[in-house]
Image (cartoon, rainbow, N blue to C red):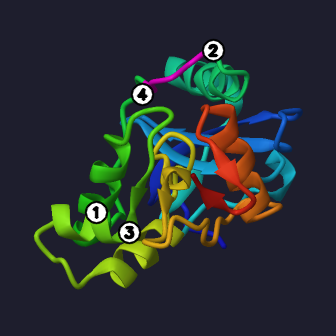
Amino acid sequence: MNIGDSGIPVWSGELAETPIGPICVTVSEVGLRQVVFAPLRGWAAQPGERPQPPETAPAWLGEALRQVDDYLHCHCRLFGLPIDWRGVGIFQREVLELTQRIAFGEVRTYADLAHDLGRPRAARAVGGALARNPMPLVLPCHRVVGSDRRLHGFGAPGGTATKAWLLQMEGVPLDGQRVR
């Protein structure tokens, strides 16, 4: 796709080897835009984005890569990165901002988040918003489980097995695919 000089300038970097596989991180001049469970060569700019050469990347690209790597090795419990919310709809942003406040090692349900939004019947809509989370790990959708305490969907390779690994790494006790 040729978008010429229009679009948001973005820079990407890769963590080639992590406990859950390669991860690509993308930032803009404003903040973090994407965390993708794929190698850099598998990453593609989103519509309206314009990839930039890595040597011109803002300093927080390296910081974002370091924080994601530290998190995956249990050295970071809280991300301190600016977020670029452009392109995220109002409802999805509300859901993701609530998700961002779920502490390391804690879980909430889709229904909990819907209730907190003042929309107690919107649990499925919350799930849909989380399924499109552009920044998993940093906006920790893996900490959200079903009302039955079971692990439901996760967009990383390995799906719920990866979600289980992340929760167990955070110290959340599981019994198979269910939070105890």
User: Could you tell whether 67 is left or right of 69 in the image?
Assistant: left
Q: Nearer the viewer, mark 4 or mark 3?
A: 3
Element type at mark 4: loop
Looking at the image, tell me whether mark 4 or mark 2 is earlier in sequence order: 2
> The residue under label 2 is which amino acid type?
His
Snapshot quadrant of residue 171: top right
Query: Which residue is found at the position 41% from the left and 36% from the top?
Result: 31
Query: Pointer 4: residues within 10 angstroms few (<14), some, or many (20+)?
Result: some
> The residue under label 3 is which amino acid type?
Tyr
Q: Identify the residue position indicated by label 4 in the image.
A: 81
Element type at mark 1: helix
49 w.r.t. 27: above or below: below
144 w.r.t. 137: above or below: below
> The residue under label 1 is which amino acid type?
Leu
Q: CA distance from mark 1 to mark 3?
A: 5 Å
User: Could you tell whether 12 is left or right of 176 in the image?
Assistant: left
Q: Identify the residue position indicated by label 1 in the image.
A: 113
Looking at the image, tell me whether mark 4 or mark 1 is earlier in sequence order: 4
Q: CA distance from mark 4 to mark 1?
A: 23 Å
Residue 174 in the image, given as x and y percentages of width and height: 66, 50
Task: Give yes or no for residue 77 being in the magenta stretch.
Answer: yes
* Frontmost residue, 84 versus 168: 168
